[in-house]
Every structure is written in C-alpha cells, then in structure tokens.
Amino acid sequence: MTTWKSIREKEGAVAPAQITLSDLIAINSFDTGDRVFPTDSWLAYSALIRTRMRLASDQTVRDIGCGSGAFLHPLVGKETAVCRIVFSVPYIEVCSTAMTSGTVKHAEATDVPFEDDCFDGVVSNSVFRYFPDFGYAEQVIGEISRGIRSDGCVAILDGCDAALEANCEATRRAGICDEGYDRFCGELNHLFYPKEWFERIAADCGRKPEIIDQAFDGYENAAHKYNVLLDSGG
C-alpha cells in the first residue's frame, strides 16, 4: 500500500551532493511535472511569514515536519537558531547537508523531544494535510503549545480548506488524468480543515488566530489553501 510516508522516504533518499534551495523545493514536491517552482516566490513567502511571526535574528524557531528543510533554508545565515523535526529518516541527511547550523531530530510530531517553553516560533509548512485525522492534528498542536514561549507565534501553513475540498480534488485529478489519479492518489487522501476548527483550537490553547488566504506566486494549488497564525493571546 502506498502511503504519504513511503513517498516521502523515496523523495528524501534522492538528493544531489550539493543541494540548492531549488533542489530542496523539488524534493518537497512543490515542483510538478516539468515545471520548476520559482525560488524568488519561495523567498518572498518565507520572508513574509518570518515578518508576520516577528522572528528576530537572536530567536529560536522549530519546524514541525520540515521535509527537506526548504522553508527554513532562507533563515539560515540570519542567526536565527533553527531546529527541524523530521518524520522520514532519509530527510535527515538532506537537511544536514543543506544546512549545517541548527539541529535535526527524527520524531513524531505528537512527541517532540524538547523542554517546555523553549522556542520563540514554531512553523509547520504544508504538513497538516498529511495527518491521519483531526485527533492527531489536535495532539500536534498540543505539543506545539507545550514547546512555544507564551509570547511566541505559531504558523501552520498551506492547510487545505474544507470549503474548497471539491475544487481542490478536481484540480488534482485534472493534473494527472482520471486513471492515473485513481492509481497513484486514490489512497493518498488529504485532510481538509474547516477554518472554524483552528478558531476553536486557538481558543482552547489561549491564542489569537489569524487566518490568511494563501498567496504564493507560481503555486497553482494556492487557491485551495490558507495559512493560520496562532499568536499570543495578549
């Protein structure tokens, strides 16, 4: 049976000796077909989220489900201390090769080996869609809440909008063809989140939610996605 984890392990196991940001983006599956994802758009996106999270150069940030490390790659060299949580083992070598600073840990997102209140920011980019169910997702947010400082900011990015699930699935199917979709994606479901779900979660953990429609030049799936910032409640 094909699973998201088995796919990620194959992707993470294939990496060039000298890794560029463009390589990391491709390994994280943002490139589709013969289209190369524009790195300038990626850099602008990363910079925007960094600004919205108010991350200063002397602060610490953790990436839950970092994959190849593409999202945090632009932060390296800005003195931000980064920690990357990897679900699939092959990505550890990719992350370590691309970014020698910071740390890489192999762990479940629901059980991260860090002390309480030790990060200024936590980001999870294009990961929540792959969780098995809402119960698991809620456990992950509980673990994030444990690790982030009270005045820090959480960014859950590129989530699938439940209100647009039919449109998103139609776009995925059209990009592959019906037969190919059923063969390769039939068992690979995404988890779609109502925006109200994040609003409830934010209230439960005493944080203020800000929901932003995804705006990402060159990203054809942006129309079906949104970002969530869980800021300090003060």
Image (spheres, helix red, strand yellow):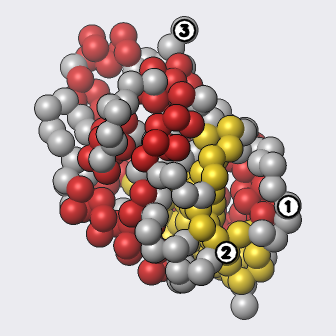
Q: Quadrant of the N terminus?
A: top right
Q: Position of residue 41 (x, y in %)?
A: 24, 62
Q: Position of residue 97 (x, y in %)?
A: 46, 42
Spatial CA span between label 1 and label 3: 36 Å
First of labels 2, 3 by sequence position: 3
Is 62 placed left or right of 180 in the picture?
A: right
Residue at (24, 35) in percent of width and height: 32
Spatial CA span between label 1 and label 2: 13 Å
First of labels 1, 3 by sequence position: 3
- Disc 2 to disc 3: CB gap under 8 Å: no
- Residue 86 in view here: yes
- Dot 1, how many residues are within 10 Å of its Cα: few (below 14), some (14-19), or many (20+)? few
Q: Which mark is in front, 2 or 3?
A: 2
Residue occupied by mark 3: 1
Disc 1, SS: loop
- Residue 120: which numbered mark, if any? 2
Residue at (32, 31) in percent of width and height: 16
Residue at (60, 29) in percent of width and height: 89
